[in-house]
Image (cartoon, helix red, strand yellow):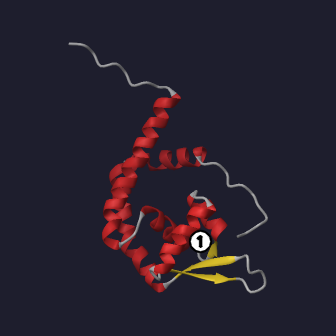
Amino acid sequence: MIAASPPSLSPTAALTGLLTLAETFQQRLQRVLRPLALTPSQYALLDALATLGPCHHRKLGAQVSRSSGNVTTVVDHLERDSLVQRERNRADRRLVTVHLTEAGRARYRQAQPLVTAVAAELVPEGMVSATLDLVADLTPEPEQDDDAS
C-alpha cells in the first residue's frame, strides 16, 4: 500500500483551498437564499445596512469588499424590490444614503438564520475565532478617499 502524500503547504495550495471554500459558501448561500429572492451579494448589503444603519455607497462597498459599481448594481436590484431606499443629500447631490426599508428588515430577518446555519455547517465552532482572524489579516484596508459617493 502506498502512503498518501501530505498536502502541499505552498501559498498556491492555500489560495486554492480558500477559493474552493469561498465557492462552496457561495453555492450554499445561493441555494438557501433563492427562495427568499436574494443573492449572496444582496444579503451582504442587507447585513451591512442592518449592522451599520443608513450609509453611503462607498461605505457599503468597503464593508462588503465590493466595488462602487457592484454596490450600485446590487442596490438597484434591492431598491427595485423595495428592500432599500436611496436618499440624495440636498446640500450635496453627489451623496446618496441607502436605507433599509421595513420590507428589507423583514427579508433580512428571514435570511439571517439560514445564512447562520450555512456558516455553522462550514466553519466548525472551534474555528470561528481563527477564521475571523485570518479574514481580518487577509482583507485589504479600504482606500481612503474624500469623495463619499
| Screen quadrant of the N terminus | top left
In the image: residue 15, left or right of residue 26? right
* Left or right, 32 with reference to 86: left
Q: Is residue 79 left or right of residue 120?
A: right
The residue tagged 1 is: 52
Residue at image location 63% in from the left, 60% down from the top: 62
> 68 or 10: nearer the eye?
68
Residue 119 in the image: state x and y as whole percent.
38, 55
Residue 26 locus on image (x, y percent): 40, 54
Q: Position of residue 73 (x, y in %)?
A: 54, 68
* Residue 88 quadrant: bottom right
For the C terminus, give its image quadrant. bottom right
Quadrant of the image occupied by residue 36: bottom left
Question: Relative to 128, does residue 92 appear above or below in the rendering?
Answer: below
Identify the secondary structure beneath mark 1: helix
Q: Is residue 88 above or below residue 19?
A: below
